[in-house]
Image: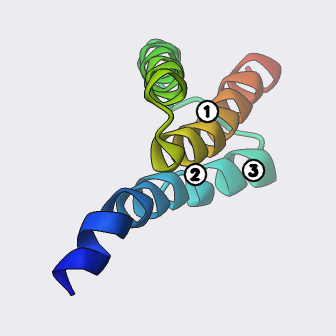
């Protein structure tokens, strides 16, 4: 069990932190409403996710690369919606 966790904990954590954005993305695009979403928070968050992705690429850590690529796409989609649905 410990060996499984050591090998897969990054993938498990990445799955949950990434999938957490999906309900928000779906709600934003379904309702076309972003009035309660802070653009500054998402700009800062997206920058952080992008930096985590670069870090994952630099150290060749696939759990970081996969999770942050997907999270970056979801976060950017919310930023796009924030701009489009003012």
Q: Label 2: how many residues lie within 10 Å, few (<14), some (14-19) or many (20+)? A: some
Please name whichever residue, 39 or 4, is drawn nearer the observer in this view of the structure.
Answer: 4
SS of the residue at dot 3? helix
Please name whichever residue, 44 or 8, is drawn nearer the observer in this view of the structure.
Answer: 8
Vertical placement of residue 70 versus 5, above or below: above
Q: Position of residue 16 (x, y in %)?
A: 42, 63
Earlier-in-chain disc, 3 versus 2: 2
Residue appearing at x 49%, y 21% in the figure: 58
Q: Which residue is mark 1?
A: 72
Vertical placement of residue 3 versus 37, above or below: below
Q: Which residue is mark 2?
A: 24
List the single residue furthest toward the bottom.
Answer: 1
Confirm or deny contact between disc 3 and disc 1 (CB under 8 A).
no
Q: Disc 1 versus disc 2: distance between alpha carbons?
A: 14 Å
List the single residue furthest toward the left.
Answer: 2
Quarter of the image where the N terminus is located: bottom left
Say which quarter of the image contains residue 73: top right
Q: Position of residue 22 (x, y in %)?
A: 61, 57
Q: Is residue 6 left or right of residue 68?
A: left
Quarter of the image where the C terminus is located: top right
SS of the residue at dot 2? helix
Q: Label 1: how many residues lie within 10 Å, few (<14), some (14-19) or many (20+)? A: many
């Amino acid at each position: 069990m410990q060996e499984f966790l050591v090998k897969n904990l990054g993938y498990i954590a990445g799955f949950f932190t990434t999938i957490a954005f999906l309900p928000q993305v779906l709600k934003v695009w379904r309702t076309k409403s972003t009035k309660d979403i802070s653009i500054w928070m998402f700009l800062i968050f997206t920058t952080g996710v992008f930096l985590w992705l670069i870090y994952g690429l630099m150290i060749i850590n696939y759990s970081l690369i996969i999770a942050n690529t997907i999270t970056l796409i979801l976060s950017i989609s919310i930023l796009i919606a924030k701009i489009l649905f003012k």
